[in-house]
Amino acid sequence: MYIIQNGTLVSSEKTWQADLALEDGRIAAVAPAIPAAPGDQCLDAAGCLVFPGFIDPHTHLDMDNGVTVTAGDFPSGTLAAVCGGTTTILDFATQDRGGTLAQALERWHAKADGRSSCNYGFHMAVTGWNESTRRELRDMIAAGVTSLKVYLAYDALRVDDGALLDIFQECRALGLQIGCHCENGDIVNLLQRWELAKGNRGPAGHPASRPPAAEAEAVARCCRIAAMADCPVIIVHLSTEAGLEALNYARNIYDPPMWAETCPQYLFLNESRYGLPGFEGAKYVMSPPLRTDEDRWEIGRALLNNEIQTLGSDHCSYNFAGQKELGREDFTKIPNGIPGLEHRPALLFSEYTGGAGLTPEQMCRILSENPARLYGMYPQKGVLAVGSDADVTVWDPEAVWTITAAAQHHKVDYTPYEGMTVTGRARAVFVNGVLAARDGEPVQTGLGRYVFRRTLDEKDKRDLGYPINVLEFTTTI
Ligand code: URP
Ligand code: ZN
Ligand code: ZN
């Protein structure tokens, strides 16, 4: 048995002083004082916050974008995850155009099984919608894959509006969750051509071709189509005030739940990075792109207010040398995505506990409970309760350290947060009851297991909730 003593335990509703006993991969006891028996191991968590292990619901590891493969794979990405305090990730298995969902799932299992240091589950990105794909959805549920992603941008991945409605209908019927990448692909394609025609070939062409309106229009359309099918939807990587307004407008007039995710980059970085000298801006090319400070503040406010339910890293890493450089002459060829899996918890804690007033309860809701609930893992994960999985993040709120590429565990040659000094760090991280990392460094690798997820029931949907009628609308889409 492993006993975590003297810590402050955290749920989404309260903090309290208690010890935690971990045994056989489960939480065996939660009690004011758990005495150690001979053979037990103990960790003194005095001064620390003890969270249900953090869950990152949005990663892309070992992903081939058709031109190049992400620098980060499952061994390195999941190791980086536990070093930063994340005990479970949900990665995007992606259907090949013309391929089946079963093939994609098999490929992703081969990438992850026996090679992962944190627990992992898969969303299924549907890129080709037809009758056989429809039939395969039941097989996905039977395999523990209970969430899909669809793209409204990227020509190699996106589905049209008719397919979107059809997919929503199926998801509604089967109880599958569905996340949507909301950017208007036609508008992006046209604006990219315009930027290139104007001679804007560098990284600054990227945000210029993906304006807030391209996100807001797609959010509005996606929500309206989801409502036509009476299907709940998750807007992933929401980045703009305009997109949030479109979402809240839809929430106020349509029935099905509409949830949202944002990412650390949309809270802690801004669009000025695209103006960096030379080709440096390529390090920040991701979609949607970085936005203005006003967007950052509004998205942050919404996250703390539970208008946005989760914070995913959207970790999708490409080396600057040799990969980002593929777009040196043409910004549309810069591979989209940035690293962030390891640093997501520290960035949130450090930047938001001061002036923004993030409480431990909110941090637990955003990083643990909400993703567990939203993606069919609660109460197996997302809560410190007897019988739940023994995934635990012991958080030292006083640790001060500096993010650098040299010290990170991501397998990539830069970090967008280089030189940022942050407060708060994972003191100890347990995966399935075993100590996986300590003070940001690995202790034991390869502890991760596949997470078989269930579909959501009505209680899950009710419990997740979101505030409505909270905004005064300044624009109507
Ligand atoms: O730029 C990004 N975000 N790349 C990953 C794919 C996606 O859209 O999530
Ligand atoms: Zn996306
Ligand atoms: Zn993504």
Image (cartoon, grey):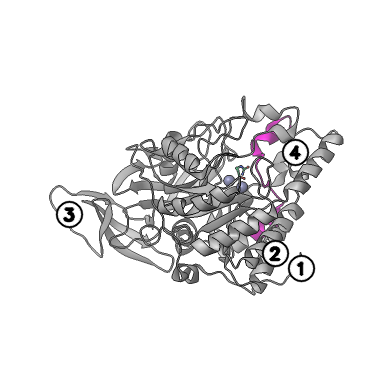
Residue 298 in the magenta stretch? The answer is yes
The residue wearing badge 2 is 245
Q: Answer with mark 4 or mark 3, whichever residue precedes in sequence.
A: 3
Residue at mark 4 to residue at mark 2: CA–CA distance: 27 Å
Which is more toward the observer, 394 or 52?
52
Residue 320: in sight, yes or no? yes
Residue at mark 1 to residue at mark 3: CA–CA distance: 59 Å
Helix, strand or loop status at disc 1: loop
Span highlighted in magenta in the image: 277-299
Residue 17 in the magenta stretch? The answer is no
Q: Answer with mark 1 or mark 3, whichever residue precedes in sequence.
A: 3
Residue displayed at 36% across by 47% down: 429
The residue wearing badge 3 is 36
Find out whether the residues at labels 2 and 1 contact each other: C-beta distance under 8 Å: yes
Q: Answer with mark 1 or mark 4, whichever residue precedes in sequence.
A: 4
Task: Answer yes or no: disc 4 within 8 Å of ligand 1.
Answer: no
Helix, strand or loop status at disc 4: helix
Q: Quadrant of the C terminus?
A: bottom right
**Relative side of 116 to 61, left or right:** left
The residue wearing badge 1 is 474
| In front: label 1 or label 4 | 1
Give the percent coordinates (x, y) of residue 377.
Answer: 41, 58
Helix, strand or loop status at disc 3: loop
